[in-house]
Image (tube, coloured by chain):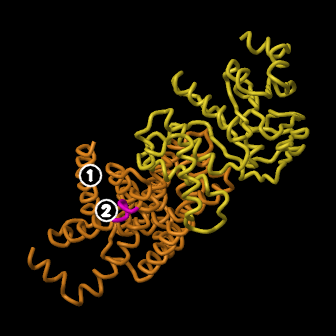
């Protein structure tokens, strides 16, 4: 069943056209990797998918009764959070914010959701630790748990392994793959790691330039002329 | 010293001067420390400092033109807060240097205008503050402001946390981060203007920044930082006032020194805990 469809999206950033007539669609349970160089419009596309930014033309259709705020989002890592005084529990439960409307305090159901998300990612014992005491890998797991709190069916991960050491990023890929297979989460991941993208995903979207893009399976991508240009670099 | 103390607790002095100072002071202190948590963690600390200099310029111009100081300074500083926030988000002109540019310009204008008009004494009031000369109007405004800030922190606490911790995630969950930033800019502007009348434009940013830094030495959670910052700032204010009255020192400076003292104590505690 189709969960997300982009029809002829055109969007600009800082007055520059970064996406032009982009179309693709993914189904429930898909694992989509978005590839592309810096400045190719990946971040703009992410903002459009999240509903933070409106596309200049074209439209994004969410299926399965999803709204934009039901997308579990893992933003790009920012250095600012490294010294932030907040416990893991506080950060994770803030993922429930989107579904709460204007009620001021978290309900016990939401506390349970947060506890389950922490358990799912194996960070329950870190719940009362301050996030500035965590390693890079633990921090990413915390932020992934927060995304899970918001996610009904779809996770959108923006360069989730940037800045992690090889062991931690391998672990991250395994966790994400497990969420995709076991929990039937649909995954959209922005990535620079073509090798891993081909290995784990079942759909590839490559934004190569504002006029040229590729959408298809990893196998099709590997044999396309776009990938040879891209991997060859 | 004992004479000072006696005078302090004489009913006339207490009711006419000390009580308004205490009420207004505690109100502004709470606002500054709560807003400070967000400003410091979002790395906007310099905005408070910049706004106080802009406020000084506005108050000086108002004094020279014989206008009511608050009515001129409040709108000017609120507009300045919007502009500074915009500049900070816009990476083309570096936020911190933009603030320095704005604030020193406003300070220079203030000094220029008031020295030309021969009002340096009156205006130095705003440079160093005069908590014992708070008008009823100032006190009422401070209390109203603090009620708004405290209610905002109670009812919007989780949203404030989310916007402070991770603006892009907050936006993705449907929280309108832009509106929160604007509300914060307005509340900070009002706090700064009221605070500078009592603490002086040179010292007000310390009330915004130091309590949060102090709380961050020991607290692990955001909630802990908010509560500790608020408590430490009120205790520092009361102790500072007591010292000022007992030893006849400048109130604003005494409060800042007590704040710094707590910062050092909490730093040591934080080190020992590790």
**Residue under the image location 86 percent in, 47 percent down:** A61
State which quarter of the image contains the C terminus of chain A: top right
Q: Is residue B175 left or right of residue B57?
A: right
- What label sits on residue B232 in the rendered view? 2
Chain hosting mark 2 = B
SS for callout 1: helix
SS for callout 2: helix
Q: Is residue B93 magenta?
A: no
> Chain B's shade in the image?
orange
Gap between marks 1 and 2, in whole Å? 10 Å
Q: Quadrant of residue A75 in the image?
A: top right
Q: Is residue B229 magenta?
A: yes
- B235 above or below B170? below
**Residue under the image location 71 percent in, 50 percent down:** A152
Q: Quadrant of residue B129 in the image?
A: bottom left
- What label sits on residue B266 in the rendered view? 1
Q: Is residue B46 visible?
A: no
- The chain drawn yellow is chain what? A
Q: Is residue B147 visible?
A: yes
Can you name the residue that lies furthest to the left here?
B2
Can you name the residue that lies furthest to the bottom here?
B11
Query: x and y percent of residue B220 in the render?
Result: 38, 50
Q: Which residues are magenta?
A: B227-232
Query: x and y percent of residue B144 in the render?
Result: 48, 77
Chain hosting mark 1 = B
**Residue under the image location 36 percent in, 50 percent down:** B216
Can you name the residue that lies furthest to the top here?
A232
């Amino acid at each position: 069943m189709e969960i997300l469809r982009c029809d002829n999206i055109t969007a600009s950033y800082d007055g520059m056209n970064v996406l032009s007539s982009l179309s693709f669609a993914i189904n429930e349970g898909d694992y989509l990797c978005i590839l592309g160089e810096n400045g190719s419009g990946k971040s703009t596309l992410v903002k459009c998918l999240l509903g933070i930014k409106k596309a200049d033309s074209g439209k994004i259709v969410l299926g399965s009764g999803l709204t934009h705020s039901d997308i579990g989002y893992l933003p790009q890592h920012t250095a600012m959070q490294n010294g932030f005084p907040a416990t893991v529990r506080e950060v994770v439960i803030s993922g429930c914010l989107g579904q709460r409307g204007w009620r001021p305090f978290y309900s016990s159901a939401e506390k349970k959701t947060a506890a389950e998300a922490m358990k799912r990612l194996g960070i329950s014992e870190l719940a009362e630790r301050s996030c500035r005491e965590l390693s890079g890998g633990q921090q990413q797991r915390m932020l992934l748990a927060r995304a899970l709190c918001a996610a009904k069916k779809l996770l959108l991960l923006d360069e989730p392994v940037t800045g992690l050491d090889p062991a931690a990023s391998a672990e991250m890929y395994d966790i994400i793959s497990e969420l995709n297979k076991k929990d039937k989460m649909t995954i959209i991941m922005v990535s620079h790691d073509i090798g891993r993208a081909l290995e784990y995903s079942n759909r590839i979207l490559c934004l190569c330039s504002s006029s040229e893009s590729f959408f298809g399976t990893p196998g099709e991508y590997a044999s396309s002329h776009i990938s040879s240009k891209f991997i060859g670099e | 010293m004992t004479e000072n103390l006696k005078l302090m607790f004489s009913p006339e002095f207490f009711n006419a001067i000390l009580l308004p100072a205490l009420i207004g002071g505690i109100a502004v202190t709470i606002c500054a420390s709560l807003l400070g948590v967000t400003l410091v963690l979002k790395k906007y600390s310099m905005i408070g400092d910049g706004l106080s200099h802009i406020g000084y310029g506005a108050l000086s111009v108002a004094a020279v033109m014989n206008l009511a100081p608050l009515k001129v300074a409040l709108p000017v500083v609120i507009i300045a807060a919007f502009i500074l926030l915009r500049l900070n988000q816009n990476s083309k002109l570096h936020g911190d240097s933009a603030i320095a540019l704005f604030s020193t310009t406003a300070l220079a204008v203030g000094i220029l205008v008031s020295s030309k008009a021969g009002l340096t004494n009156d205006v130095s009031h705003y440079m160093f503050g005069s908590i014992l000369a708070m008008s009823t109007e100032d006190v009422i405004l401070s209390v109203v402001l603090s009620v708004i800030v405290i209610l905002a922190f109670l009812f919007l606490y989780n949203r404030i946390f989310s916007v402070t911790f991770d603006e892009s995630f907050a936006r993705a969950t449907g929280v309108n981060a832009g509106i929160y930033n604007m509300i914060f800019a307005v509340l900070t502007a009002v706090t700064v203007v009221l605070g500078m009348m009592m603490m002086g434009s040179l010292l007000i940013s310390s009330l915004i920044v130091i309590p949060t830094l102090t709380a961050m030495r020991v607290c692990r959670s955001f909630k802990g930082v908010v509560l500790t910052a608020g408590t430490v700032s009120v205790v520092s204010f009361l102790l500072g006032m007591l010292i000022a009255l007992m030893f006849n020192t400048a109130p604003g400076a005494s409060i800042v020194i007590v704040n710094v003292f707590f910062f050092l104590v909490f730093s040591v505690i934080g080190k020992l805990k590790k």
